Image (spheres, rainbow, N blue to C red):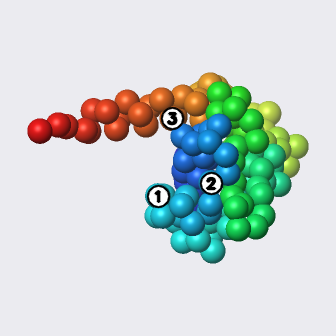
Amino acid sequence: MKVSMKLDYGVRVLVDLAQHYGQGVIPASEIASRQGIPEPYLDQILVALRRAGFVTSKRGPQGGHMLAQPPSQVNLGEVINALEGSPSPRCIAQPEDCDRATVCVQREVWQAIEEAAQKLLRATTLGELVERQERRSEVSMYYI
């Protein structure tokens, strides 16, 4: 599966917002700084995430962005579909466009891969990614 920069950044933005869920709005400049995303590109991603209903925004000097719903209610499958559309091969997503769809043995393999990937993506929430990030941060910390 290829992951575009837009999708990679989009998930990073959502995980960042999930880590700060319940703390009010987060300025785009803070997200950009923490995630290493150029702010003009971040603004484009935030627009897409807002249109998809994942993010709400407040304008003005005290403005910023926050998740529109709890992190445990947003799964990666929804995020990918919103930012990139269906990741399925064309013969899976649009079998009517392929004259070999009913006889192609490869299609069975692509279908199995697609089903496994979708199952994993639907089962992985932003809340789970935040928990993984916290565990990873704890392991990498050391004290003197």
Quarter of the figure with residue 114: top right
Q: Amino acid at mark 1?
A: Arg
Q: Is 7 located above or below residue 129 in the figure?
A: below
Q: Amino acid at mark 2?
A: Ile
- How many labels sit on residues? 3
Badge 1 vs badge 2, beta-carbon distance below 8 Å: no
Disc 2 or disc 3, which is closer to the eye?
2
Q: 143 or 90, which lies in front?
A: 143
Tell me which residue sits at (54%, 61%) in the image.
Answer: 30
Element assignment for label 1: helix
Q: Is 41 located above or below residue 113 in the figure?
A: below
Which label belongs to residue 130? 3
Q: Is 55 located above or below residue 132 in the figure?
A: below
| Category of crowding for the residue at label 2, using alpha-carbon neighbours closer than 10 angstroms: few (below 14), some (14–19), many (at least 20) | many
Q: How far is the residue under mark 3 from the one under mark 1?
A: 15 Å
Q: Look at the image and tell me in which quarter the C terminus lies.
A: top left
Which label belongs to residue 116? none
Quarter of the figure with residue 94: top right
Residue tagged by mark 2?
Answer: 26
Q: How far is the residue under mark 2 from the one under mark 3?
A: 16 Å
